[in-house]
Image (cartoon, helix red, strand yellow):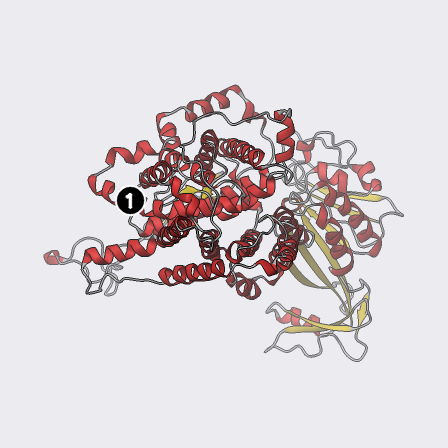
Amino acid sequence: MITNGKAAEHKSLVEPTETTPALGNHDGGVANDSAEEEWVLCAEASETTYVGQKTGFDANWLSGKNIRRVVARSCSVSKLKQRLPITLWLPKYSWQDLRGDCIAGVTVGMTSVPQALAYAQIADLPLEYGLYSSFMGCFVYTLFGTSKDVTLGVTAVISLLTSACIPKEADMLDRTRYAVLLAFLVGLFQTILGVFHLGFLFNFISHPVLSGFTTASGFIIMFSQIKNILGVKGGLATDSVIQQATGYMRNIGKVRGWDVLLGMICISVLLLMREIRVSNKSKLPAPLREAIRIFAAARYGVVVIFATLIGFLLHYYNISALSLTAQANTALPAVTFPEFTWNNQSFFDHLTSLSPGIPFIVMVSSIETIAIAKAFGTRYQYTIDPSQELIAIGLGNFLTSFVSGYSIAGSFTKSSLNAQSGVRTPMGCVFTGLFVVTAQATISHCFQFVPKAALGAVIVVAVLMLIDLKIFKELWVTRPSELIPLIGTILSSMFLGVDIGFLVGIGLSLGLVLLSLAKPRLKLEKQEAFYVSRHNPAAAKNVVEIRVVPDGEIFMAAAEPFKHFLTEKLFRSRVVEQTRPDSGLGHDIHDESPDLFYRKYSVGGTINSGHLNLIQDNSLIAAASGIRQMYSECVLVLHGEDLRKLDFTTLTELHSVVDQFGSNGHAIKFVEVPVRLLRLLLPNTIRTSHLSKADKPNDLRSLTVKPSPASWRSRGGRASIHVTPGAILDSITGESSEDGDHIRDVALRLD
């Protein structure tokens, strides 16, 4: 809703003087020296805009007119182009774009192939399944993605979660079936979330929880690769750290020295190549600089190629010094539907087995992809659509299952390499996918010679970026309380499993949110007034009105603390006569400093001092100087606008607060409170006597009720009603006056 302010027109224009010249050009057409002197303000207007979504259910949302409008808008040409972003940039595609995309795509492809082989080991699947999962997502993202830099493919965390979702008793054939079916279901759910714009649900997962989960996953993956570097057998990557450590201790005597040596060499080379930087200001020729950059960017492929060559030579000469991977399937995957039934089990049986892990993969895959797209969109100043990204990753997972692939997500490593290689459009993903398909078709028979130690080294170096240690310092400085879900996620993921750890982190994070909701944030607006008695010059009254304004809505969790604050902490002072026997309360008052100082006895017996600024009036100052007694009156102000922020549980608690305030002698002032709320808040004696006939809430839309400090439960109330404007009513009947005016102010004085 937008409220327009009235334009304020200035009737008197500025007269020309020496400092403010008249409007128009000067003699000779010379312009003013100052821009401020050239213009004179004639009129101005103000506008207030309230931005936000209305909460609650709107019955008009399901009306036929609204449905037709939504369908028409969804089927418009502009909306269809948004759903297929390639139609927006493909007509502008140029040869320069083709060159940049080709170079970047091939560079990323050289990294995707060795990582796909390595991450398939994390998922405990055959090596070729890593390649099956690395090309279809690239093709799909080119059509539906909104970021030029994001590259979809297998990732370490998703591979770990995939392995955790598959039943442990399944053999290798069943594991591949479960993995493919899991990708199908994950893609289906992600597409539905994107179509219905439900991506906001992922906002309930805090950054510390996600960071703790990825850090723990990175450490678990690194720890699980020790078996490949040592050349020993171990458990699955999804086993807890304790289970993996127990397996290593059991097989410590079977360590293979050549595997350890090759693994350490590969890790060292990868870390050194990662630090290679070539500046554009270097004196090296431009082609050589570009070759060095590509060599450093494709470091994983370079290391795997050299290690594979060593493995081939050892195998050729029948030297079993290194542990090699198993023989991979060299054929390209067939395009077919995933298997829904096998081993005499129905689709619903398999769905039951996979259902506990589906939400985790959906959340992590979606959050990773959207976060990467947002990061690169901010860096290179283009806009991404989170809902469209969900559709892209969902369709990518869905169609990947038709080529025997498992779940994929946006990869930060490959996306960063894509951006650094100069990609210009999402077409770069097409060249990455073509490179993976070509490698699968031509060199897949060489994968059997890849040493396991080399793949373990690739995984260790690749997941180092998942471990985020800076967040500990950042949270300690900014929000120490959020260290609880971070540490809880890491520890529970490492020792109980990644799925349980993720749940623990979400639970701790939501617990902090609920704890904050249980402690209401309130703003207190205090008004204090001082009155001198006309009949007793020595008596005065100090009235303190405090309006309690909630900072946001108050829900049921904060109902009891809100009630405790109002009844126990808001007014600590007794409403009794305050005296100062030695001299008048205003004995220190003089013309230069017209302040009234006084003392107040609190509930605990301590004495609090206070002062009020007197109005600059000699008669008032003289009257205040003779005060010997002062009465205190504390008034709680409840405004209808503030009461709308309270849920029903809090309003019911407020009913007892109203009753208790009357017993304690405090006053409550209701301002602009609807009658329907007054029926809920006021005690029975007043509600039954005076509000029972107000059947139509609109008749008493806004009113003010002020009970006196005396106890109202033992005596009946006598109402004195002031209607402005309109006739005076003798009682609260809920009937409107003849001219349609409604009751504005009602004061209840209880005798």
Label 1 residue SS: loop
What is the count of numbered marks? 1
What percent of the width, then of the height, locates residue 333? 43, 31
The residue positioned farthest toward the left in the image shown = 28
In the image, what residue occupies the spot 80% across and 53% down?
A: 661
Q: Nearer the viewer, residue 258 or 97?
A: 258
Determine which quarter of the picture holds residue 702: top right
What percent of the width, then of the height, locates residue 219? 55, 56
Where 229 falls versus 625 (above or below)? above
Is 109 on the left or on the right of 125, as rendered?
A: left
- In this orientation, does residue 446 appear? yes
- In this orientation, does residue 3 appear? no
**To which residue does mark 1 refer?**
424
Q: Nearer the viewer, residue 576 or 602?
A: 602
Q: Nearer the viewer, residue 725 or 608?
A: 608
The residue positioned farthest toward the top in the image shown = 64
The residue positioned farthest toward the right in the image shown = 714
Mark 1 residue crowding within 10 angstroms, few (<14) / some (14–19) / many (20+): many
Q: Nearer the viewer, residue 116 or 70?
A: 116
In the image, what residue occupies the spot 36% across and 33% down?
A: 143
> Amino acid type of disc 1?
Arg
Is 262 on the left or on the right of 443, as rendered?
A: right
In the image, what residue occupies the spot 24% across and 55% down?
A: 290
Where 495 falls versus 333 (above or below)? below
